[in-house]
Image (cartoon, helix red, strand yellow):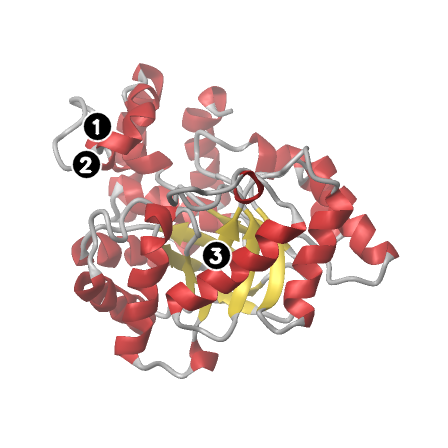
Amino acid sequence: MQYRRLGRSGLQVSELSLGSWVTYHNQVDTAAATEMLAAAMDGGVNFFDNAEVYANGESERVMGAAFRALKWPRLNYLVSTKFFWGLATEGAGINRKNTLNRKYLMQAIDGSLQRMGLDHIDLVYCHRPDPATPIDETVRAMSDMITQGKALYWGTSEWSAGEIRAAWDIADRHHLHKPVVEQPQYHLFHRQRVEKEYSRLYDDIGLGLTTWSPLASGLLTGKYKDGIPPGSRGALENMGYLAKSLTDAKKLAAVEQLAPIAAELGCSVAQLAIAWAAKNPRVSTVITGASKLSQLQANLGAVDVIAKLTPEVMARIDAISAPIAQ
C-alpha cells in the first residue's frame, strides 16, 4: 500500500480506503465491521469513510463500536463523515434537513462525535451543495468546527468546480480554514467531472480527491451481466434507483471487453477498475466498499495491479470505456 498527500495538506492517506455506504448496519453488523476494519488496517488502509445519513446514523454507530473494539491508537487511523441530508428522526425540523446552514452543521458534528464515540473527526464534508444557504455561512461554520477541534480538515462532496472555488476564495479572503478535498464519484464510466471540470483546481488550489464508487455500484464486477442477483446491492429495496444503470447493455458489453485485459494482468475486472481509478495521480484515495471479508480482501488486491497499468494498457482500457463514459 502506498500513501498520498490529501491535496496540499500534510495529511497522508492510503491509496485505497474503506467506506461504509450501504453496507454498515444494513448488511454489516459490528462484529463483521470489526473484522473487516482490522483486515483493512493489516492491508495498509488508514482511512475509513462514513456519513451522518448512512443508515440514518447507524453506520456511524457501527463504525465507532468497531473502533472501540479494536482499541487502535487514535493517531493510526483517519475517519470521515458528511453532512447535508440530516437524520430522518421523528419531528425533525426544517433547519436540519437538506441544508448547510450554521445551526444544522454545528449540531450535526456533535451528533456524529457522539455516535462514533470520538473526540474529533479527521475529515468532514459538505455532502452536497446547498444553494439556499449563503456559501460564506457554510464556510464559516465548517472552519469553526476545525477551530473548535471537533474536526481537523474539511471538504466537499459532489460540488461543482465553481462552488468549490467560491468556498475556497471566501476562506482565503477571510483567513478561514480552506476546503482541501472533494469526494466525487469516479469510475470508468463516470469521468468528466474529475478529468475535465476540476482540472484547473488541482494546480490552482491544490484540491485533493477521495473518490467513491470505483466499481460503479458493482457493475464493474461483472455480477450483473445476467440481471440483478438476489442479495446484491442492486437488489436492496432502498437501492432500486440503480437498476437501470446496472443493466445498461452498452456498459455490460464494455465490462465483457475488459475481462481479457484483466486476465492478461492476472486480476479480476473489479481489481482492474479499482486500480484504474487509483492510477490517476490527482486521486488521493479510492474509497472501496465490501459487505463481506472476502470482497474486502479481493478489493485490496488491486494495489498490486496499479503498477501493471502501463500507458499501453491504459489506452486499451480507454478505448473500451471512454466512448460511453459520462
Relative to the observer, which residue lies in front, 153 or 59? 59
Q: Residues at badges 3 and 2 in contact (C-beta under 8 Å)? A: no
- At 63% across and 37% down in the image, what residue appears? 130
Where does residue 27 sit, x and y in percent of width and height?
20, 48
* Secondary structure of the residue carrying numbered label 1: loop
Query: Looking at the picture, does residue 190 appear above or below residue 293?
Result: above
Per the rendering, the mark at residue 224 is 1
Which residue is labeled 2 in the image? 232
Q: Image check: 5 left or right of 269?
A: right
Residue type (three-letter) at the residue carrying disc 1: Tyr
Relative to the observer, which residue lies in front, 134 or 82? 134
Q: Residues at badges 3 and 1 in contact (C-beta under 8 Å)? A: no
Sequence-wise, the earlier of marks 3 and 1 is: 3
Any part of residue 24 in sight:
yes
Sequence-wise, the earlier of marks 1 and 2 is: 1
Sequence-wise, the earlier of marks 3 and 2 is: 3
